[in-house]
């Protein structure tokens, strides 16, 4: 886990993680909104050396896939932040982004400030998914916008387009240290590639048998067939099969989250109605 400082000044070429066969790095990018980064004092993502997009691309060109954590609901965020997040993640070729609403943790400066400003939801289970009351949008806009961003990022076309941009267009090479080592050991090279291929086939068969949605199964077959034609290396085939499995997990999680959210909102509305005082109707004369 790191920050965009990781991409600065030759650090990539010297980073021990490359010789240790690291394939991915998780970076707390948080937001493309520079005002929000200054608000949270995350200045390391704003240092000289190019835009945040440039820094992510530099890490990818060096051979690491970037996963990211993104946050919505800073004081400088208005409703335009949702599209900004979508655009940044797409252009950054970040396949797996974890998007959450800002939450105030007790005994932190944010918690203390929100308590002073009367913008902290004290409920044990906040109905809007966060205890932060946003400044430049309503709580409903934040909750619904955050869900929509996650839903849109993991639509099959959006997800696999980012994956293809990274591995088929940029042609990022996964596990470079291992591959360099295996070039000098033909026997081990053969065994590990046979293992990778067997794992890719195993994951593919489990997806075809275990995913109930025929549309998703068809999408996974289409994407794996495309990578088989364009980059048939076993290490890439295994990676794509695993990315299909990750997509199915996230797709299912988002579906359940949507249904749970709908149920909670219905429960809240019912409670709101139940709490209203009952006014007796006046009886009119016959």
Image (tube, grey):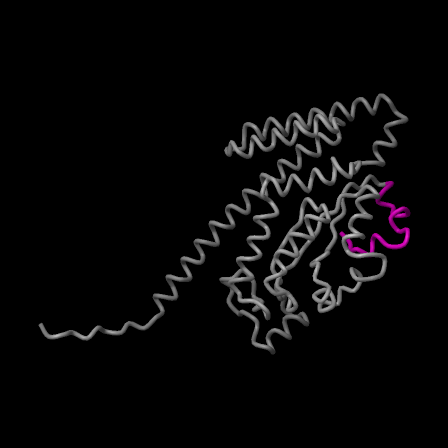
Q: Which residue is drawn at 56% across and 43% down?
A: 251
Quarter of the figure with residue 8: bottom right
| Spot occupied by residue 148 in the image (x, y as percentages of width and height) | 56, 53
On screen, residue 25 above or below 215: below
Residue 125 visible in rendering = no
Magenta segment: 1-19
- Is residue 5 one of those drawn in magenta? yes
| Spot occupied by residue 165 in the image (x, y as percentages of width and height) | 72, 40
Q: Residue at x 86, y 28 (%)?
A: 182
Q: Which residue is drawn at 51% across and 65% down?
A: 124
Q: Is residue 137 left or right of residue 226?
A: left
Taking the view exactly as shown, the residue that stands out farthest to the bottom is: 116
| Spot occupied by residue 48 in the image (x, y as percentages of width and height) | 85, 61
Q: Is residue 150 left or right of residue 127?
A: right
Residue 241 visible in rendering = yes
Q: In this view, does 236 lie to the left or right of 179?
A: left
| Spot occupied by residue 210 in the image (x, y as percentages of width and height) | 54, 31
């Amino acid at each position: 886990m790191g920050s965009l400082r990781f991409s600065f000044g030759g650090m990539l070429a010297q980073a021990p993680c490359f010789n240790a066969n690291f394939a991915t790095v998780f970076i707390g990018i948080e937001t493309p909104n520079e005002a929000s980064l200054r608000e949270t004092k995350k200045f390391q993502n704003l240092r000289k050396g190019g835009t945040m997009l440039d820094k992510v691309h530099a890490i990818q060109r060096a051979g690491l896939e970037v996963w990211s954590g993104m946050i919505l609901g800073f004081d400088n965020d208005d409703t335009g932040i949702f599209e900004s997040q979508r655009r940044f993640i797409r252009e950054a070729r970040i396949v797996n982004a974890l998007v959450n609403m800002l939450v105030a943790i007790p005994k932190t400066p944010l918690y203390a400030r929100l308590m002073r400003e009367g913008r902290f939801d004290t409920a044990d289970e906040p109905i809007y998914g966060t205890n932060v009351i946003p400044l430049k949008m309503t709580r409903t806009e934040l909750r619904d916008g955050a869900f929509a961003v996650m839903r849109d990022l993991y639509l099959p076309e959006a997800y696999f387009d980012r994956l293809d941009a990274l591995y088929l267009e940029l042609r990022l090479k996964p596990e470079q240290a291992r591959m360099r080592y295996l070039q000098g050991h033909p026997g081990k090279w053969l065994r590990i590639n046979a293992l990778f291929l067997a794992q890719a086939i195993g994951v593919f068969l489990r997806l075809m048998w275990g995913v109930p949605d025929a549309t998703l199964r068809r999408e996974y077959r289409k994407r794996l067939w495309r990578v088989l034609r364009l980059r048939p290396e076993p290490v890439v085939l295994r990676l794509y099969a695993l990315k299909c499995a990750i997509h199915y997990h996230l797709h299912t999680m988002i579906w359940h989250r949507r249904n749970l959210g709908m149920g909670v909102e219905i429960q809240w509305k019912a409670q709101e109605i139940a709490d209203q005082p009952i006014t007796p109707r006046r009886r009119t004369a016959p």
